[in-house]
Amino acid sequence: MNKILEVKNISKIYQGKESEILSIHNINFDIEEGEFVSIIGPSGCGKSTLLSVIAGLEEKTTGKIYIENEKVDGISEKIGYMLQRDCLLEWKTILDNTLFGLQIKNQLDKNTKAYAESLLRKYDLYEFKNKYPSELSGGMRQRVALIRTLATNPKILLLDEAFSALDYQTRIMVTHDIYDILRKENITALMVTHDISEAISMSDRVIVLTKRPGTIKNIHEIKFNLENRNPINCREQTEFTGYFNTLWKELGVDG
Ligand code: ADP
Ligand code: MG
């Protein structure tokens, strides 16, 4: 397996109004190509900070980041980012929203447009291409947001609480759809979530952070005895409850 992302000794200090805030401290981990890794930890422990630093949206205070063995400082073309809000533009059609990521990166041409359209077709959204976001369900909107990101051809997708605005039923369906798309397109994923079940259901590994300053408390491998594992069928496995209890305890009062 190839290491696609290496995070080495990352720390981040924010300049607060009165003092410095050490948000994350000495974070080290690697991700292999095609892996799905989740990060969980107490609220305010620095999960979003870590993703923003990896995305190059925030400067790191110490440490190094390598993507496909190349040192990265700042924003990398190889990274896509999905947030809690789908950030679709209500006045643009689904097709124009899908092309928007390419447009702002100056990558919109015949080929990239055809690729974006092929993704819409493959994931059953093409017939909605002339509709507006308000005409779609929350789950479909998240799929459009994902396709907009994938159209720019990232290697690694970062997801920050990407499903937490959705109601429970929709969330389960959307995690299933998104997981399926990421596997089919061979995208490596790093997801922050506060939902332990969501983390277990989607991940090959779960990284647990301590309370702030966030450091790595533990990294758990998640394995199920299933041939075609997905975020729904693994919930019925006996191992699921075991993982849940372990992670629940680890996130307990001592952070
Ligand atoms: P999480 O995503 O785990 O809830 P965050 O990464 O958002 O946590 O925040 C971690 C800590 O860093 C918090 O104490 C927060 O107040 C601080 N922090 C985050 N962003 C900034 C910022 N732009 N300026 C100052 N402090 C910040
Ligand atoms: Mg956060």
Image (cartoon, rainbow, N blue to C red):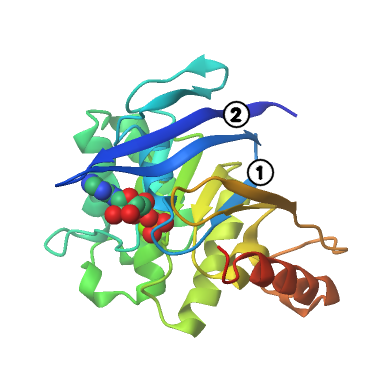
- The image quarter in which residue 179 lies: bottom right
Q: Residue at x 60, y 70 (%)?
A: 252
Q: Residue furthest top?
A: 70
Residue 8 or residue 32, whichever sits in front: 8
Residue behind mark 2: 4
Q: Position of residue 219 (x, y in %)?
A: 69, 49
Residue 125 or residue 224, whichever sits in front: 224
Residue behind mark 1: 35
Along the polypeptide, which appears first: circle 2 or circle 1? Answer: 2
Q: Is residue 255 above or below residue 11?
A: below
Q: Position of residue 55 (x, y in %)?
A: 38, 36
Q: Amino acid at mark 2?
A: Ile
Secondary structure at numbered mark 1: loop
Q: Residue at x 72, y 76 (%)?
A: 235
Q: Amino acid at mark 1?
A: Glu
The answer to whether the residues at label 2 and label 1 have Cβ atoms under 8 Å apart is yes
- The image quarter in which residue 33 lies: top right
Secondary structure at numbered mark 2: strand
Q: Residue at x 32, y 66 (%)?
A: 128
Q: Is residue 206 above or below residue 151?
A: below
Q: Position of residue 185 (x, y in %)?
A: 57, 44
Residue 137 or residue 201, whichever sits in front: 201
Q: Quadrant of the N terminus?
A: top right
